Image (cartoon, rainbow, N blue to C red):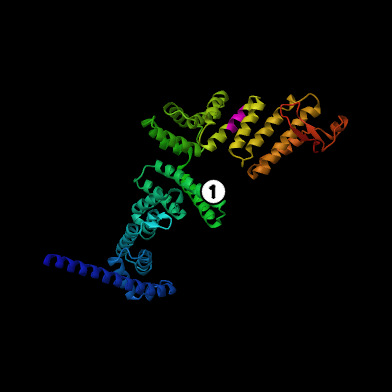
Amino acid sequence: MKIRRFLLLGLTFFLLGNVTKAQDCETDYSLYREYIGHWKQAKYNPNNINPQMITSWRNVYNNCPDLRQNTYLDGVTIMTYAFIRPEKNAEIKDKYVDTLVMIYDKRAQYFPNGKNGSQIGNIMGRKGIDIYTWAPHRYEEAYNALKQAIDLDGNNSNYAFIDTYFPLVIKMVQNGKLEESTILEEYGRLMEIAEYNIQVNTEMANEKLLNNFNATKANLDLAVQPYANCEDLIRIYQPKFDADPENVELLTKIAETLEKRKCDDSQLYLSVAVNLHKVNPSPESAYLIGKKYLAEKDYNQAATYLQQSTKSTNNDWAYQSYIYLAQIMNMNKSYEQGRTYARKAHELDKTKGEPFIIIGNLYAASSKECGKSEVETKAAFWAAVDQFEKAKALDPSVTAKANELINAYSHSFPSVETLFFNGYEEGQEYSLENCWIGGKTKIRAAKN
């Protein structure tokens, strides 16, 4: 009984001690929060600090780490404005940065989740930025924190983290801590995140974030330029390919990088594409080979692979495969098949005007196949211009190209006299049902 009474008494004192400690923390929390409010009004001037604010905050931080998340948010403010900013001695400042890092890590430990789930990525990203801001010689530590943040958050990564992280990747490479290929690999990953957020914020009409991610995209493009010309890419990737020519992951990475940087006319590109198709045949590898044969003007071989690549799950590649096939059909004078391919491209991406540019060119190229009289043969130009008008109405990016073609082919319309002597008037409807083009168009005279 005595032992039991002793244990109960000990438990009571323990619980009372915890209650007392919690009450003390609540008091200290309220006290330092009041002082920090006054300090904020003084614009965080280090000369306006009440020492009790520091003491009370430290008590909460040390004794009740799970009391409030504000403890850590305020801790960053206190360390930054009261200690790090005004400190002139580099060695002492570095020790203050150590404390700042501890605050971030402790926040991640006790408050790993926020309103929208895990916030560890966000915490690590902010830690990385602060490390590099106040202790740039600790760039590797900052790099690791920011890499962790972006690895965790992916498409939800803060644009500011990307803006700081990519220059750190380059710095790590320059100091021999990462392979040079990492620059291009990370560029590709970060660019995908930026482009995803540009699309999302365009749809949501979030102008502020849209502008931020557009700026991030521009920063990435500017920073990568010294490492992104084709000669550099081949120098970086050729040894990797030679060392492991059947590594599907490596082959895919090299092929995508060369494709993105428009280095698909190199021998390395073709070697990678062919190996990729042998090791792991897919619509994607067929696309890469088809593009290379297209660049070499081997249109029959190109068409063989591009037909396979139209089945790609990469919508952009499938779309572009149909575009290339339509252009090849135009060169082969297989006009109707070319239109079929162009229309399939339009089905995959209804925002682009290029399919209608191609259809217009197909119509114009086939003009002599649509009749014998001058009006009949030149009617194809009316149909062609209809397609160019449709293209620029749909896609402003092709306006200049469409206008150039409209101007060129408008001069090929029948003259006013030719129309008159053949019994036609401008503005009349004209049927193309006797031609492969089909449908109807509007009669127009050539412009002087």
| Residues rendered magenta in the picture | 322-328
228 displayed left or right of 438: left
Mark 1, residues whose alpha carbon is within 10 Å: few (<14), some, or many (≥20)? few
Residue name at image x 34 percent, y 51 percent:
140
| Residue 239: percent from left, percent from top | 38, 33
Tag 1 secondary structure: helix
Q: Is residue 399 visible?
A: no
| Residue 94: percent from left, percent from top | 31, 61
Residue that badge 1 annotates = 199
Question: Where does the C terminus fall, quadrant-wise?
Answer: top right
Residue name at image x 35 percent, y 51 percent:
144
Q: Is residue 325 magenta?
A: yes
| Residue 294: percent from left, percent from top | 55, 29
The quadrant holding residue 97 is: bottom left
Determine whether 150 is above or below 381 in the image: below
Determine whether 349 is above or below 79 in the image: above
Nearest the viewer among 379 and 331 is 379
Report the residue that reaches farthest toward the left: 2
Mark 1 residue type: Gln
Q: Is residue 338 magenta?
A: no
